[in-house]
């Protein structure tokens, strides 16, 4: 659990410091390129992970959350500070949720329930951040 929380804190810090876009980089065209090249494939993968969980394939779903987020974290963030902030939080929450979920599957009793509760919270937080990313994209592009 500590590892997942440290990853979340590190990502939040990185989004605020390392991904400050320039004014020229916030043009919608750059954001659209980012969406089609990075965000859309990741969002599709997260949707598939939720589907796996809903079908009772917990290990597969948890692994997909973690691996997709881990793969997307080092990719370039969108050239818009607000979208980048929510994107970074979303990825960190999905990564932490996947980790907690897998840890919970490896445990039993109260410890397993605590890990699964934490995973559920992280995955819900990630989904909320994802909805903000989509809403901001729509607002920026007038849709």
Image (cartoon, rainbow, N blue to C red):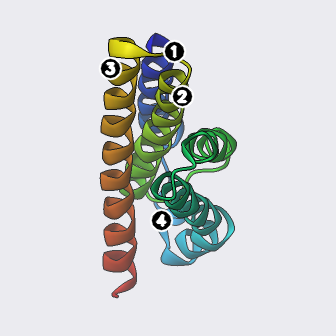
Pointers 3 and 2 in contact (C-beta within 8 Å):
no
- The answer to which quarter of the image holds residue 137 is bottom left
Q: Residues within 10 Å of mark 4 (few under 14, many from 20)?
A: some
Query: Marks 4 and 1, how far apart in space?
Result: 33 Å
Q: Label 4, on which residue? A: 26
Query: Marks 3 and 2, how far apart in space?
Result: 13 Å
Mark 3 or mark 2: name the one nearer the start of the chain.
2
**Relative image position of residue 91 (x, y in whole percent):** 50, 44
Query: Marks 1 and 3, how far apart in space?
Result: 16 Å
Residue at 56 percent of width and 20 percent of height: 106
- The mark closer to the camera, 1 or 3, is 3
Q: Label 2, on which residue? A: 99
Task: Name the foreground residue: 22 vs 101.
Answer: 101
Pointers 2 and 1 in contact (C-beta within 8 Å):
yes
Q: Is residue 107 above or below residue 99?
A: above
Horizontally, residue 136 falls left or right of residue 108, namely: left
**Relative image position of residue 95 (x, y in whole percent):** 53, 36
Task: Name the foreground residue: 92 vs 50.
Answer: 50
Does dot 3 land on a helix, a strand or a loop?
Answer: helix
Q: Which mark is residue 114?
A: 3
Does dot 4 land on a helix, a strand or a loop?
Answer: helix
Q: Residues within 10 Å of mark 3 (few under 14, many from 20)?
A: some
């Amino acid at each position: 659990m500590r590892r997942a929380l440290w990853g979340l804190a590190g990502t939040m810090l990185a989004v605020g410091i390392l991904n400050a876009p320039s004014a020229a980089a916030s043009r919608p065209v750059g954001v659209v390129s980012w969406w089609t090249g990075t965000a859309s494939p990741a969002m599709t993968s997260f949707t598939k992970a939720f589907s796996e969980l809903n079908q009772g394939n917990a290990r597969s779903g948890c692994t997909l959350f973690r691996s997709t987020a881990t793969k997307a974290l080092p990719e370039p963030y969108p050239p818009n500070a607000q979208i980048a902030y929510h994107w970074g939080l979303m990825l960190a929450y999905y990564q932490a949720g996947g980790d907690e979920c897998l840890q919970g599957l490896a445990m039993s009793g109260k410890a397993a329930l605590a890990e699964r509760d934490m995973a559920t919270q992280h995955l819900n937080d990630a989904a909320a951040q994802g909805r903000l990313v989509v809403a901001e994209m729509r607002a920026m592009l007038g849709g």
